[in-house]
Amino acid sequence: MAGLILVYTGNGKGKTTAAIGLSVRALGHNQTVGFLQFMKGSKNYGEVKIASVLPNFTLVQSGQESFVSYENPDPVDIRMAQEGYELAKQWFKEDKFDLIVLDEILVAVAFKLISVAQVLDLVRQKPSRLNLVLTGRYAAPEIMEIADTVTEMTEKRHAYNQGVEAKAGMEF
């Protein structure tokens, strides 16, 4: 059976959370999951903390703990994103996962850490049976065009904008 390409994008909350939920669903069916986070390096995320105890779940971060500058990304951010891209290519070649999530790769493209052409090339290398999820704001039209499913998260209201601080287990 051919694998699907899913895009979770938009300015609303829930893209990574939806990808984690899909990963848990896949694990429940005894599938293997590779979860590669671009532009994230903090070990304080709940998914990072739980990853080591989830069987068949591999989580790798390819980013610094600090935020990336849109106008002037640090060369380290570019290098780390490119390393993540190379790891994704390696995972595709190894063909050991049933589901791969490339979390925040769409933001990495928008910040010019990775090109749209690289992502399209990567998708062309996808093993046919592999399910692939691409997450992040600012999805390029060319990437949305090749996806089987595109979900756009739309923010209607967010507690943070009302002065509520980020909560462990909810925001990170």
Image (cartoon, grey):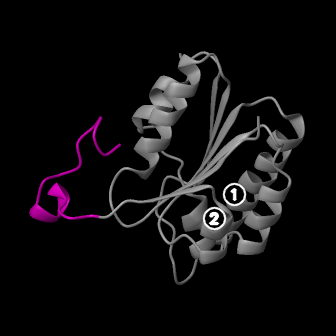
Measured as percent of width and height from the top left, residue 105 is found at 61, 59
The secondary structure type at the circle numbered 2 is helix
Q: Is residue 110 left or right of residue 151?
A: right
Measured as percent of width and height from the top left, residue 136 is found at 50, 60
- Mark 2 burial class by Cα count in 10 Å: few <14, some 14-19, many 20+: many
The residue that mark 1 highlights is: 80
Residue 116 can be seen, yes or no: yes
The kind of residue on which mark 2 rests is Asp
Q: Which mark is residue 77?
A: 2
| Rendered residue at 63%/64% (across/down) | 77
Measured as percent of width and height from the top left, residue 163 is found at 11, 60
The kind of residue on which mark 1 rests is Met
| Quadrant in the picture for the C terminus | top left
Residue 80 shown in magenta: no
Measured as percent of width and height from the top left, residue 58 is found at 65, 29
- Mark 1 burial class by Cα count in 10 Å: few <14, some 14-19, many 20+: some
Residue at the front extreme?
A: 1
Q: Which residues are magenta?
A: 155-172
| Rendered residue at 54%/66% (across/down) | 107
Task: Mark 2 and mark 1 in contact? Answer it, CB < 8 Å.
Answer: yes
The secondary structure type at the circle numbered 1 is helix
